[in-house]
Amino acid sequence: MSPRHTRSVLAAASALSVLALAACSGGTSGSDGGGQSGGSDKIKVVASTDVWGSVVNAVGGDKVEVKSIIHDPSADPHSYETTADDALAAKDAKLLLSNGGGYDEFFDKLTAQAGDAKKLVAYDIAATGDENEHVWYDLPGVDKVADQVAAQLGELQPASKQAFTDNATAFKTKVGALEKQLGELGAAHPGTKVVVTEPVAHYLLESAKLTDATPKAFSDAVENDTDVPAGAVNEYKQLIATKQVKALINNAQTVTPLTQDVVAQAKAAGIGVVDVTETLPQGVTDYIGWMTGEVEALAGALK
């Protein structure tokens, strides 16, 4: 239920310079992020973001045709306005997958236009019991979503049901390897303190048993796009200056002068900076590849 993020042109450009992010597709199997193509035998799916589009592609393989509405790092799900093309894709889709939890409310309009298409909401499926909506970082929740996608695709194309189940199993095996890696990090660094510019990777840090020492007023203000209270800024910077934290987890897609300032301070202090994102980076077309890079970056910062 997070408030809207602000991603100005300057913010997007800064994020691009940090991670070489670019508009990219929601996956590789019959999907280009901006439209649908392929044979009529493919199951048409619309996902709210390329993150969930990549999960659908992992499960559906060459039997799905996916359109990911948000596939550009500069696009903000909280303020996105749907287009006629989006509405047409939703009307033609047989399955729709959104994040939910207040993250992509624009998708509600598309869902209403989708007729009798099957509809899945990742936040509801993950059922974390936590208000943080960034559930693509909740690996057990992502497993549940993969299972639900396989089940729904299997109903839509019964002849391929076993293939969808097998694909989901293979995907979950890879997710399981990441969970194991995070567990090992937790065992090696129990309770280690970190700070974040925004609580995007909340679930990932929980899985690694890391303690988020960020003053709540700091991350709330950044996420709200409001001024961070001076006291919270001072407290945050003191944690870095005195090296009470081991790493700074930075949402590279929400860039402000303040986040740039604290990232520079952390680097100058020799504290590892781990860039995380909400969409797939350039050159990465699948969820596992993306998340592996982020877990490895976190492990490197904790050494």
Image (cartoon, helix red, strand yellow):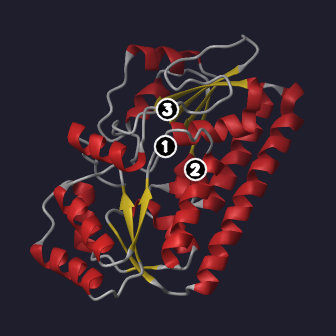
How much space separates mark 1 and mark 3, taking CA atoms?
A: 8 Å
Amino acid type, label 3: Cys
Q: Secondary structure at mark 1?
A: loop
Q: Is residue 247 above or below residue 21?
A: below
Label 2 is placed on what type of residue? Trp
Q: Which mark is residue 203?
A: none
Residue topped by disc 1:
281
Disc 1 and disc 3 in contact, CB within 8 angstroms: yes
Q: In the rendered image, which residue does mark 3 sit on?
A: 24
| Res 107 quadrant in image | top left
* Residue bearing the label numbered 2: 290
Where is residue 284? Give x, y as percent. Answer: 57, 41
Q: Nearer the N terminus, badge 1 or badge 3?
A: 3
Marks 3/2: CA–CA distance? 13 Å
Please tell me in which quadrant of the rendered image residue 264 appears. bottom left
Q: Position of residue 200 (x, y in %)?
A: 41, 59
SS type, badge 3: loop
Q: Is residue 91 left or right of residue 214?
A: right
Residue shown at 68%/53% (left/top)? 144
**CB under 8 Å between discs 2 and 1:** yes
Find the distance from the CA under tag 2 to the CA under tag 1. 7 Å
Q: Residues within 10 Å of mark 1 (few under 14, many from 20)?
A: many
Residue 218, how many percent across, how many down?
23, 69
Label 1 sits on what residue type? Pro
Secondary element at tag 2:
helix
Q: Quadrant of the N terminus?
A: bottom left
Give whichever of discs 3 and 2 has the lower sequence position.
Answer: 3
User: What residue do we see at 73% from left, 47% from top?
Assistant: 147
Asked if 157 appears above or below 245 in the picture, the reply is above
Counting from the top left corner in percent of width and height, residue 274 is at 43, 64
Image-based side of 58 in relation to 191, left or right:
right
Q: Nearer the viewer, residue 92 or 138?
A: 138
